[in-house]
């Protein structure tokens, strides 16, 4: 399929492979972008991008390094302003930035207090429970936490504000396999715990991370969306691919460098 | 939410508080006549606002941008502008309190000597209320520099340079004209009028007659000029015509060899005396000054101007923080 440009996402709820029966209610999108572009100096990190992220699902954003994943997620989180086009995000956003930035001099308890101070809604009980479950010492300074602990604390801050949309930028990129598994389990737990159907989008350059957790996949390469759809549908539509990994790699091979 | 702003600036605020306590202890202990202590304490009041701007203002936004924590702070419900407003207000209050306290202590301590010296304008910058305005301005300037430079150390350097420049410019070029000066005309006095050049680098005017200003108690003399009845100034060529040979070394004598104040030879003194007497026939000395009663109006005016400037700069900082990204 040569000349594939930014493809609109396959409409989410209708053909989502996860739900089973056909849902005829109108499709909700948690994130919607049209003609989205972001330029840094002379380089376009994202160009002419069309994007639909279905609500109430876990979406994986995959792509090689430098594809524009961070730019896209930071645009959605309101940290960046688009150079062209627009991006619409519905609902409250919880955001965990790449490398989980925290205040090195502030303790774990200080961070929870910070979350409470800066948010209109805050579930202090949930935050404390999550921190204890992750075996974090409340008095420990964030600068002395391990990578896995940092990620857990950052996720706690994002979850305790009770968001409708959770955006995670490469949350497991620098974690060891055990911490990686624990983090993904925590995300799954948070999704299960939020009764209202939280939307999650998280990015990774490893397909394996996404395969287990995601119902929907968006492939970003060379500053544009190359493929989007429910994981089940994507796999079913092309029997020649044994795994999601093979599918993604075959698409990446066609992307102009 | 106040807690957060306080928590993030705790270190520098503690240092500033310790400095205030140190100043108070020195003032309680030292005799008021001690000139060295007097100079030190005045210097502390003069440099305190700049230091507050550098160490509390400059890192406020820059540190967040440099370490990436802005990605955490600015994606909470409060948003970046509310976050900035909160931190600016709380930290500015700490700066203003520190500068105000130090100035208050030093003003109290130096008061008796200041009053006896009848030179209140000589210590205008390091007494009473103006240091509060400087501190507020330096602090917001630091925050703006941080939002523009996005790195802490460059922001600190920019803050120090910009604040020093703004303050010196104000002192030299704006303050003398804040209120229209009073004018007093006196005859030129041959006994106290000299000849030479004055000024600071790079503003060194050519040599001219230098009349001594008349004694006006506790006033600030902003300019001394030599005018004729029509209000025209004494030009260099006019002076050279009236006093040929002025400023030239007397023939056959070497200068004093750089050994400080050598007494001028009697011939030169009498020539100078004659010259000034001749000039005084058509010219007189005109002094522009701010009388003693203008001290407090000028203090309030300067405080108001620096506080207003601080508000403007804080607005610019908020605008820049919104623009980032």
Image (cartoon, rainbow, N blue to C red):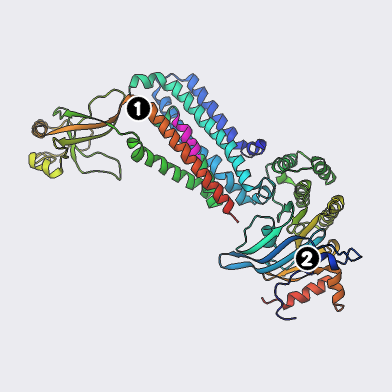
Pinpoint residue A230: horizontal percent, then vertical percent.
83, 67
Task: Provide the chain ID for the residue under circle 2.
Answer: A
Q: Is residue B99 left or right of residue B112?
A: right
The dominant secondary structure in magenta is helix
The stretch drawn in magenta includes residue B130: yes
Pinpoint residue A85: horizontal percent, then vertical percent.
63, 65
The stretch drawn in magenta includes residue A60: no
Q: Nearer the viewer, mark 2 or mark 1?
A: 1
Query: Are there few (<14), some (14-19), or many (20+) residues within 10 Å of tag 2?
Result: some
Q: Is residue B105 left or right of residue A125?
A: left
Query: Cα distance, mark 2 to mark 1?
Result: 73 Å
- For the magenta stretch, what is the residue range? B129-138
Q: Which residue in the structure is indicated by mark 2?
A: A206
Query: Which quadrant holds the C terminus of chain B?
Result: bottom right
Q: Which residue in the structure is indicated by mark 1?
A: B294
* Residue A232 sits above or below residue A148 on the image: below
């Amino acid at each position: 399929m040569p000349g594939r440009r930014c493809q609109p996402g396959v409409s989410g709820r209708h053909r989502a492979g996860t739900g089973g029966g056909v849902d005829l209610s109108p499709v909700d999108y948690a994130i919607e972008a049209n003609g989205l572009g972001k330029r840094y100096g002379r380089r376009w990190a994202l160009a002419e991008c069309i994007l639909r992220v279905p609500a109430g699902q876990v979406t994986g954003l995959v792509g090689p390094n430098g594809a524009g994943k961070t730019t896209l997620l930071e645009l959605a989180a309101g940290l960046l302003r688009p150079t062209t086009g627009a991006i619409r995000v519905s609902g409250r956003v919880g955001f965990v930035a790449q490398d989980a930035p925290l205040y090195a001099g502030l303790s774990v308890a200080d961070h929870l207090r910070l979350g409470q101070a800066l948010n209109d809604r805050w579930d202090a009980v949930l935050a404390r429970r999550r921190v204890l479950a992750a075996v974090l010492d409340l008095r420990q300074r964030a600068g002395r936490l391990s990578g896995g602990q940092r990620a857990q604390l950052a996720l706690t801050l994002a979850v305790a504000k009770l968001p409708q949309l959770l955006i995670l930028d490469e949350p497991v990129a620098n974690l060891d396999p055990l911490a990686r598994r624990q983090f993904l389990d925590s995300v799954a737990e948070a999704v299960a715990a939020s009764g209202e159907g939280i939307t999650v989008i998280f990015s990774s350059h490893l397909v394996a991370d996404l395969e287990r957790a995601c119902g929907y996949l968006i492939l970003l390469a060379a500053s544009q969306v190359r493929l989007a759809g429910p994981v089940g549908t994507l796999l079913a539509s092309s029997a020649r691919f044994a795994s999601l990994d093979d599918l993604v790699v075959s698409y990446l091979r066609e992307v102009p460098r | 939410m106040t807690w957060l702003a306080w928590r993030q600036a705790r270190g520098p605020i503690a240092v500033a508080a310790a400095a205030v306590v140190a100043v108070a202890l020195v003032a309680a202990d030292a005799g008021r006549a001690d000139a060295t202590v007097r100079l030190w304490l005045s210097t502390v009041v003069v440099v305190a606002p700049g230091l507050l701007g550098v160490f509390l203002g400059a890192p406020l936004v820059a540190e967040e941008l440099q370490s990436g924590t802005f990605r955490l702070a600015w994606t909470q419900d409060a948003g970046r502008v509310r976050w900035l407003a909160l931190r600016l207000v709380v930290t500015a209050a700490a700066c203003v309190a520190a500068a105000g306290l130090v100035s208050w202590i030093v003003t109290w301590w130096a008061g008796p000597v200041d009053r006896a010296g009848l030179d209140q304008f000589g210590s205008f910058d390091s007494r009473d209320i103006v240091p509060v305005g400087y501190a507020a301005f330096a602090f917001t300037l630091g925050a703006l520099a941080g939002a523009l430079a996005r790195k802490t150390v460059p922001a600190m350097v920019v803050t120090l340079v910009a604040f020093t420049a703004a303050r010196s410019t104000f002192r030299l070029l704006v303050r003398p004209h804040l209120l229209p000066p009073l004018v007093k005309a006196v005859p030129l006095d041959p006994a106290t009028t000299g000849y030479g050049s004055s000024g600071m680098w790079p503003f060194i005017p050519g040599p001219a007659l230098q009349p001594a200003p008349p004694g006006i108690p506790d006033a600030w003399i902003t300019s001394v000029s030599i005018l004729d009845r029509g209000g025209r100034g004494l030009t260099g060529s006019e002076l050279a015509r009236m006093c040929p040979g002025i400023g030239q070394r007397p023939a056959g004598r070497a200068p004093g060899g750089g050994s400080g104040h050598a007494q001028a030879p009697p011939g030169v003194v009498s020539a100078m005396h004659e010259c000034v007497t001749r000039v005084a026939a058509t010219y007189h000395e005109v002094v522009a000054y701010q009388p003693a009663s203008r001290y407090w109006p000028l203090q309030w005016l300067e405080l108001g101007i620096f506080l207003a400037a601080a508000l403007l700069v804080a607005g610019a900082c908020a605008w820049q923080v919104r623009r980032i990204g």
